[in-house]
Structures are given as structure tokens and as C-alpha cells.
Image (cartoon, coloured by chain):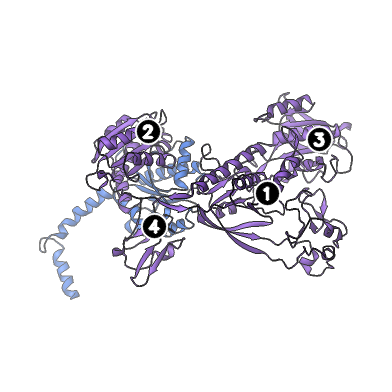
Amino acid sequence: MPDPNWQPRIVAFFCNWCTYTAADLAGVSRLKYAPNALVIRLMCSGRVDPQFILDALAKGADGVLIGGCHLGDCHYVEGNYKTVRRFEMLQRLLRDLGIEERRVRLEWISASEGERVKTVINEMVEQVRALGPLRLPQRQEEWDREMTPLAEPAGQSPLAPQRAAAEVAHA
Amino acid sequence: MNTNQKNGEVRIGFYICHCGHNIAGMVDCPAVAQYAAKLPGVVVSRDYKYMCSDPGQELIQQDIREHQLNRVVVASCSPLLHEHTFRNAVAAGGLNPFYFQMVNIREHDSWVTADRGQATAKAKSLAHAAIRRVRFHRALETTRAPIHPDVLVVGGGISGIHAALTVANAGKKVFLVERNPSIGGHMAQFDKTFPTLDCAACILTPKMSAVRSHENITLWTYSEVVKVSGYVGNYTVTVRRRPRYVNEELCVGCLECITACVFKEPKFADEFNVGLSKRKPIYIPFAQAVPPVVVIDPERCLQVRTGKCKKTCLEACADRHAIDFAQKEELVEIKVGNIIIATGFKLFDAKRLPQYGYGRYPNVLTAIEVERYVNSSGPTAGEIVLRDGRHPKSVGFILCVGSRDMKTNRWCSRTCCMHSMKLAQLVREHTDADVTVFYMDIRAPGKGYEEFYDKSLAEGIQFVRGRVAEVTDWALSPEEEGKLVMRVEDTLAGFVRRVPVDMIVLAAGMEPQADSQDVRRLFNMSCGTEGWFLEKHPKLAPVSTFTDGVFIAGCCQGPKDIPDSVAQAGAAAAEAMALIDKGYIEQEPNTAYIVEADCCGCKSCLPLCPYTAITFEETKQKAQINQALCKGCGTCVAACPSGSIKQNLFEDEEIFSEIEGVLNYA
């Protein structure tokens, strides 16, 4: 049963020049939005290593949001184009890992779009809330528990004889 | 260097700012401080009313000395606002300024969260992340790059002119680039200026001539910036100089070529008089144009278009040889340290509001057309006439045309109330016609502006509050016959009126230039959703942009009148000069570098860098990053498969610890 007190946790990687500034503008404009997104500032969305996203999910995030300048507006000319390519690749990887694609979102929010920060974060929180907790750290523990018997010396594991046979056949 | 700068035992000082009520009103600051005090490595944890104040900064310095702190975390406002302040405080305490991390709990938390418990929890997560991250910080040095002392000013309206003159008067070299054949901009088209009613030409033309004769200004009209590269202090700019087919050095502005042109009569719409008069293919934009030289319209001139013309203009210019049909477009590259953008606005196209009949009824005019009629060097030499030559007996002004309107533009164009009242006074002066102004609100917020409104009332100009619904020539009574009838709800009297007049003036509002998006990209600026260029801070950095060394002045930032435009131009010039006179810029040490031992020489990073800062050293089979060219985006860092590229201030360990920190604060 899902925990009734569960709140989605979203890690947001915002580029310094557009989306982080837009989030500042949302603040200055006193727009109220869900407190679930925690922002990590980077100079450019191009700095977002797919590992950061996987790491965030592995450490317990329920979703990851990446915010950058609109295509063509990148402060570093074309960093966000690299972000798109990595993002597409990562989405495929997430599919293979059985993680819903909607948990990871890429958004272009320019420095003047404070209102959009609010909309995107609220939308994303609701989307992730509908998907439920990802629980990757807990699931990893569960997988580890399932795998422990397999790692034990041959003979004790029910699968061991078959595996040994397969190895012989392969040789 | 202080002994506590070694990466040995980490001793963190954590400070949370109340920011008066701004943060403390929504975040339980003492609770966050107590929570932080228990985190590993934290030696001091305090909450304080205003961390950015002198006593707040002193607190940090004192703790660094007393508690041998070697890391500092401040949770307060956005790092874009005060990161510099606190880095300086840390440095004043004897620590390397980069042993500092800032947590944004105002813009990103207290101001945007509605629940105190949630806001406090969020502040704790963010603080936790910073405390984990700061552990991995290293001592870094800022690098200094020299500043090229020349300045580029884009746009030759009153803002560009004033900015260029201010910088040039300080002894710096200025390039002033203007798209049109003459500088002067919109102001040159005005007859008088509010609220003093001094003649626009009388105050503008001396400044225009000063630009031309100034030894420090290189004036390029009929030219456009096409490419910008580099960064603050070191911009390389390519300017396209369109051929005017007239040598600016040789032409003396005698205008004999215009008389001699094979087109005996002026045939083409004159841009300066907004189409109210005609010009020839060879023309001078207006009498006081700067530079005072003629220009050939390539789309109209027979010689340029077809190569078949008697070239009577050449004969007229025989002894000066100023006309040169062999002129070609030229691309000129210049180096400048700072750029001031003053590209101005365009007027709202009144045809977009068909209910006012502009373009359909000949006696519906825009304010700028009336401005040209009033001007003694205008198409009618200062007479206000209807299209059939009669003088109007009654004139109605419609305000907020294309302003304060959800269907067109939401913003107030700020000048139309005053501009219309000025024209109303001039119309009365020139014609004695009855003048009625239809307004929603009269906005006269400036020095002497309210008095100007009073003067308008005293002069018998009528004001009716109500947005005009429709302009029609359908007469319902004999007195409406042959007139334009305005249907309007008089919201003060509380009934719908029909007001017949001879002439209607539409106070068309201001809009961003049609190519503002292209210009924004060219100079790497941001735009608001409307298309006005975005200032770095609406109050405290009104002429700066997010790109260092690029400043904005005048109406390209938003609608404003002449005094405000000039004030901004002066401010932009001062900002540029502050950078130039300092002589160097300090660059944030957030560049990427390669750990050579780990580089596998795969060359994945090479094509990623837009600044070609990464090169491949064939002998070593390793990539190298030129620190002077690197801008610190980190794109190559994210791509390196062997993890050999690192970015100062944004190292992998720092970000991973931040991720872990935001997720596991409890």
C-alpha cells in the first residue's frame, strides 16, 4: 500500500541563465507553486550528465526536471541542443529500465517566463503523484535480497546445476 | 595563505538569513539553523536578521577567525543577487572566496511556498545539499582579461546618439551603427516635445551634428550588425555596410543630383514623412539628415535596377564624383569591449483595429502623421489639412490604440497620453478646431506632465472618458453628414454618445521592432514574452543584460519618453565606462579542464565546444582545453566517457553530493 503521507520528490537541474533566472522571477512575482521540486543550479543544461538523472532516481527522487534556455537562445550558443540529444537517448534507456518516461522531463523556460516555472513544476508534481513513488533505492534492496541466493556457492542454489550445465554446453 | 584552507578537516559555518520578514515569515529559520548544526562538519550554525548587512558579513569573518572555519554556507536570497557579496565577505575573513556555497531559500522557497512547514522542510533539504557540496569545494583563483576600450552603439535614435556622445566625450572610441540612411530616429520626426513644447529639431540636430563631427565617433549609417562573437571586453562584431551608391566623403549635400534625376517628379513614398509626401529614387532622408548626404534607393533607381539610365545625376555631380554605382556591400569587422543596444521601437499598425477605419476613411490619421503635418518642414509646411485640402473644424483623438488592450498589446505605451495632449494643443494653435480627447485614463506621471494636462484643460481641449467603440461615416442626423462619427460610451456621464468630427487622430502605441527576436539572438540577450529586451534586474540593473558587456537603452527595453530614454542612455554609457576604466574583467573560474592521465583520446569532446576551446594534441593523443577560450558551460564535461574533464565550481562530486543532499535531508 502506498504511504498516504508520501510526497513526490523532484530534483530539478536548471541552467543559470534562463530557467534558474525564471525561477527567481517566479519568486520575485510571489507565484506560489508546489514545494516538491528542489533546484540544483548548473551553468548550462548541457552540463546535465545523464548520470545525474540516473543518480537522482537511484537515490530516491520520484522525478527529474531539466530546465534550459529555448533552442536557439542558449547562452553558450548550442549547449541545449546537446541536452536534447542526451535526453532522447536517456529516455530510451529509462524505457529499458522500466522507469516511466514521464518521470523525467525537459523544459525550455526563458528568463522572462516565471509563470511557466510555476505551471511546469505544478504539472510535473501532479504527473509524478499520479505515477506514484518510484522507490528505486527500496526496490534495489529488494532485488539484492532476491539475488542473494543466486550468488551463493554452487549446489546450494536451486539454479546452480542448470547454470553449470549451460556452461558445459557452451564450452 | 591561511592554514585552514587545506582540504583536511572540514569546518563549516552555516548562516541562515531572515531577510527581515521575507524569509522568516515563511521559513522557521532557527529550526533550520538547529538542524544544520547537527550535520557532519558544521562547526557554527546561526540565524541572523540580514546576512548581507555589514554586521552580517562581519559575523562570517569573525567566525572564520574564531572557529577556524574553512567552508561557509549562507542560506538567503538568489546567488545571482548576493553570491558576490558573500564571496567577498569570505575573502575578507581570510579564506579563499570559492570555499563558499549559497542556498536560495527566498526566491526558490519562502516567496513561492504557501505552507510554513513545507517551506521549512524545503529550506532544510536545500541547506543540507549545500553543506554536503561545500565539502568538495576547492580554492580557485579568478582570472583577469583585459577590456578593449572601444564601444559599439547599435541604433542612432536619441538613446543611441546620447550614449555614443557620452562615451565619446569621455575619450573612448565609439562605433555608432544605424540601419537607416540618417541618424535621428523617431525624435527627428517630431515637431515639438512635451511638456515644454521646445522644438524637437532644435534640441536634436545639434547632437546629431556633434556625432558626425566628433573625433571619437565612427558613424556608420545604412549599416547593420550581422555577427557578434566573443565576450565582455573582447567582442568581435561584423557590420554590413549597405551601398548607398554615394561616396559619403565626397558628397557635399548640394542636392543637385536630385534635381537632375531622370524622374522629373517625386514619385515614391517618403519614409520620413510616413508616406505623406513623395521623393525620388535619389534623395536625402530629411533636410537636417546626418550624414548630410544623398542616398540612392536601389529598388527604385533605374541604373541600379536595370543598368539602363541616362545617369543625369552623374552629370550633375561631375566635378565631385560622389555618385558611385560600382559600390558594393561591404562587411567590416571591428573589435569592441562593450556594446550598447538602442534599437528602439516600431509603431503599432492602426490597420489592425479595423473598427477605427484607419486606411479606410482618409481622414483617420495616426499621431505621427499629424506630427508631420504640424511640422513646418513637413509635407504641408505646417498646415493641418484634411485629405481634400480643407481645414478641420473638429478633431477627435483616440488614445490607447494598440495599448492596454487584451486583443492587441497589454502594456501601456506610456507616451501616447502626453503625445496626444501635445498634438491637441498644437492642433488648436494651428487651426482653432474643437479638440476632443477620448481616453481611458490620463497618465501624466512626470516632471511638469500633470501641469501640462492642466494646461490642456485650460486651453479648452475636451476630455471624454471612454474607449471609442467604432468610427463610422454613416450619418444618422444632418449634423453628422459628411463627418466621421465616433461611437463611444462616456463612462463618466454614463451614456453612449455619437460624436461627429472632421478628423480623427489615433494615438498608436509602441511595439518591439519586428526583428527584435533576431537582434536578441545576435547579442545573446533575453526578451520578455512581448519582445522587449530584458534587463538584468528591473530596479537595480535596468540597463544591464544577462550578457556582461551588453547594455540596453531607450525603447528597445520598453516604451518610454525622451527624458527616460536619454537617462537610460547615459546610464548605459556609464556602465560601459565603468568596465573600460577598470581595465580588466574578472572571469568566474568555472572553466573546464582535463585530467590528462585519464584522457583516453577519444575526441568525443572536440566537436561539442562552440568556442573551439578544446584542441587535440596529436603527439600525446590527449585533448586540451584552452582556459582563455572556455566559457564554462560544462557541456564537454557531461559528455566525456572517461570522466577526465572536470569543471571548476561544478565538479561531479559537488553535484552528486548536492543530489544526495536534496533527497536525504532527514
Q: Is residue B233 above or below residue B607?
A: above
- The image quarter in which residue B624 lies: bottom left
* In the rendered image, residues at marks 1 and 3 fall on the same chain: yes
Task: Work out whether residue B491 or residue A114 is closer to the camera in this orientation and state it.
Answer: A114
Residue beneath disc 2: B51
Q: Secondary structure at mark 3?
A: strand
Between marks 4 and 1 in the image, the one whose residue lies nearer the viewer: 1
Distance between the Cα atoms at labels 4 and 3? 63 Å
Dot 4 alpha-carbon crowd within 10 angstroms: few under 14, some 14 to 19, many 20 or more: some
State the CA–CA distance, disc 1 to disc 3.
47 Å
Q: Relative to the observer, which residue lies in front, B450 or B417? A: B450
Which tint is chain B?
Answer: purple
Q: Position of residue B3 (x, y in %)?
A: 25, 44
Does the residue at mark 2 contact the one at mark 3 (Cβ under 8 Å)? no
- x, y percent for residue B108: 41, 39
Report which residue position mark 1 lands on.
Answer: B211
Quadrant housing residue B28: top left
Alpha carbon distance from label 4 to label 1: 57 Å
Amino acid under disc 2: Met
